[in-house]
Amino acid sequence: MSSSKVRVYFLSSGRIGVPILDALCQDTELELVGIGSQPDKEAGRKQKLAPTPLANHAQELGRTVDKPASVNAPEFLEHLKDLGVELLVVASFGQILKPALLDLPRLGCLNVHASLLPKCRGAAPISEVILNGDEETGVTFMKMDPGLDTGPVYCESKCPICPTENVVQLEDKLGELAAASIGDVIRRIADGTLQPVPQPAEGSTYAKKIKKTDGAADWNLPAIVLARKVRAYYSWPSLFALLPVGGNYKRISIKEAAPIDLPHDSKPGTILQATSKSFVIACGQGALNIIRLIPEGKKEMAASDFLRGTQVVEGDELPPSTGDFLTQ
């Protein structure tokens, strides 16, 4: 290959990296010299080791994937030096890059961050914009520094957030958005026509890492907020609750739901409707219509199918969602 091609190494773990990887592989004016992702982790009911979404896709393409326990380890830095990496591209990777690594590539490290910085710095920006009820988001191409998503910005691409879009759907859309520009951004960085600009001093927010307990349904919240949580936590941990069934409690994970403006004077958590057409729970404001769910130990199904096979009584109350029993 021509020596004029920028030698790129790609670090990514999440779904957003999949279309970006495809774009890097298909760009004939770049040389993708390596791919790295987080080590395989236990997943599923049987807790079998599984690759990250990015690593799985790369392996399907027949590409070798490095899976370093630490990208800051001396042996990995030597590996990058041996490859002659000129630009390191990072997208939803999952490890903090230390100064020795940030300073290694001639052109630095380019982060593809899934928000419009300085808004939603941190670990879960896609979920955060859904939780906030934002109508717009995008991807920011940023020159990495030692701070947490604080580096200067090369450019950004914006897109609307659909009112029913969940975190997986939005991540895929942002991945395609980033992939459309990644090659041009890299070339402009390499030829010096694209220079980074410091982020504004004001307006920064932080998207904290999601915990399992964040998925516990608090029926005292407005229905619109709970519906956002369903969308934001779709992939993990899901919005979950305990449902009274036949004198016991059955855990359900809510995968799709819509807020409805249903006047009621019932206690939050009360089952208002449980028919073949609707499964509605009273909230602190309005009510939540559950459309799809996963009963404990079963596969995802329509709420109507669940109700046909399960005795759920209108007027029963779901227990408070604060408590360790919900997360076990």
Image (cartoon, helix red, strand yellow):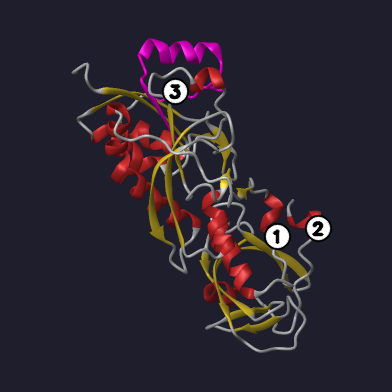
Give the label on residue 136, or none.
none
Q: According to the image, label 3 marks what residue?
A: 66
In which quadrant will I find the N terminus?
A: top left
Lateral position of residue 29 relative to residue 182, left or right:
left
| Residue 248 coordinates in the image, percent (x, y) | 77, 68
Q: Position of residue 283 (x, y in %)?
A: 69, 77
Helix or strand or loop: what does disc 1 sit on?
loop
State whether residue 91 appears in this view. Answer: yes
Viewer-closest of 311 and 187:
187
The reply to whether the magenta stretch includes residue 136 is no
Q: Are marks 1 and 2 in contact (CB under 8 Å)?
A: yes
Answer yes or no: do the residues labelled 2 and 3 have beta carbons within 8 Å?
no
State the extent of the magenta-drawn residues as a range: 65-90
152 vs 324, left or right, is left
Q: Residues within 10 Å of mark 2 (few under 14, many from 20)?
A: few
Q: Quick check: 147 left or right of 57?
A: right
Amino acid type shown at disc 3: Asp
Q: Earlier in the sequence, mark 1 or mark 2?
A: 1
Q: Which residue is mark 2?
A: 323
Mark found first going from the N terminus, 1 or 3: 3
Could you tell me which residue is drawn at 47 percent across and 50 percent down? 116
- Separation (CA) of disc 1 from disc 2: 9 Å
Disc 2 marks a residue whose amino acid type is Gly
Which residue is depicted at the point 38% across and 10% down? 82
* Residue identified by numbered label 1: 216
Q: Amino acid at mark 1?
A: Ala
Q: Secondary structure at mark 3?
A: loop
